[in-house]
Image (spheres, rainbow, N blue to C red):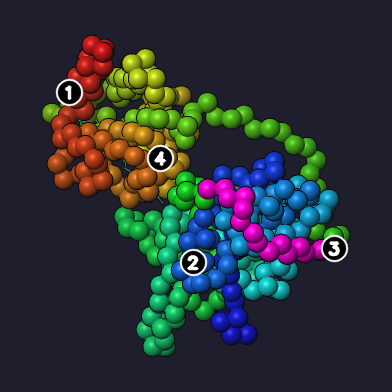
Amino acid sequence: MSLEQYKDVWAYCVREGDSLTRPSLEILAAARKVADKIGQKAVAVILGHGLDRVVENAIAHGADAVVYADEPWLEKYQCLPYTRVLCEMAEKMKPYAFLFVADELGRDLSPRVAYRLNTGLATDNIDLAVEDYYFGPTNTTYRNILAQIRPDFATRVAKIYTPRHRPQMASIRPGNFEPLRRDPSRRGELIRFRPTPVEEDFKVKILEEAIQRKSQIDLEGADIIISLGMGILRDGEGNPRNPREAFTLVSEILELIRRNYGLKGEIGATRALIYSELKELEGLITSERQVGQTGRTVAPQIYIAVGISGAVQHKVGMIKSKKIVAINSDRDAPIFELAHYAIKDDLYKVLPRLRSLLAEG
Ligand code: FAD
């Protein structure tokens, strides 16, 4: 089987009511971007039951085609039948690339599908590109390969290629692509699969369902986020400070901003601060506030980084913020490279001043 036979960019989409979840719309936009670069189709792949309106909405949101299975036994997500059906679809239709959302469901499903299709999987991408890839040992250039872009485990952004296997599979973190605007006049092809259930698929049974309590900390819905980093542990002279002081200061600042400007604020944090498990911040700075590669991806109107160095793993979670303000006492801190407004000073001087200015109105 030659690699050229593999065509089109698939996005595995999850329904929400009559449409798709926001992260699914985002990966459909990612599929559109790649498909346009290689002159092929963006395809939404959907499993479930009662999908008539859902498939129409997928076309309206940018899919050229929808490959789907609409069966009562596929109504609820179950990893075994979903994996089998997706693999059957991919084996038959041979996509060039297959994208998933890097969320709980995508993290369960995508490695199973990749393993069974005998291909690779690059997880937690923040962007995708199409490039030629040169493989030195065999002196071969592979044309139009998917470059899967994600932070590496150290300090850089890495590109991952799967030149010799298909489909090229990637999961994409929510918050990195903007969904395409709904256009009900778009037309597309609907390709319905009619898989048969297999007893083996139902070895795992759903015994009970419980609705998970939604976090009270709504970083994604905030207009302004003030994030705290390890810098809050010492003042500009290097004297130890109670980190609770910085937390109280930013809480008061956010309350004044809410009162003065009607903006909804939240407190974020770096992983380093959260992992420090400081007793002064117990119950206040928890993993729900983590911004970054292994935390949340946010894009508020204003992001204020307080005592944060700007490591790549933090940066990828906040770089899409509309305006970035950085307060850091080190003029060489990498965070200043992304900041629209740079305040090079001791945060324990800047925050009280900001609070007074806001209190004056
Ligand atoms: P530091 O790097 O220690 O920076 C503290 C900053 O405060 C310094 O720049 C210093 O100049 C400044 N400062 C000190 N005192 C003051 C003062 N008085 N006033 C003003 N400025 C001051 N990190 C994340 O945030 N999110 C993630 O999701 C994440 N995921 C990761 C995943 C992996 C696989 C790995 C390996 C790492 C991950 N990290 C993540 C950790 C990341 O690499 C950094 O270690 C972390 O972001 C650094 O946090 P920080 O900026 O708070 O601390």
Which residue in the protein does label 2 denote? 36
Viewport quadrant of the C terminus:
top left
Depth check, mark 2 against mark 1: the one in front is: 2
Q: Which of 188 and 238 is in front in this view?
A: 188
Q: Residue 299 carries which label?
A: 4
| First of labels 4, 1 by sequence position | 4
Q: Can residue 5 be seen?
A: yes
The percent position of residue 257, horizontal first and vertical second, equals 34, 20
Q: Main secondary structure of the magenta part?
A: loop
Quick one: label 2 or label 3, which is nearer the N terminus? Answer: 2
The residues bearing labels 4 and 1 have C-alpha atoms spaced at a distance of 27 Å
Decide: marks 2, 3 in contact (CB < 8 A)?
A: no
Where disc 2 sits, the SS reads helix
Q: Which amino acid does label 3 sit on?
A: Thr
Which label is found at residue 196?
A: 3
Q: Is residue 26 above or below residue 69?
A: above
Is residue 112 shown above or below 74?
A: below
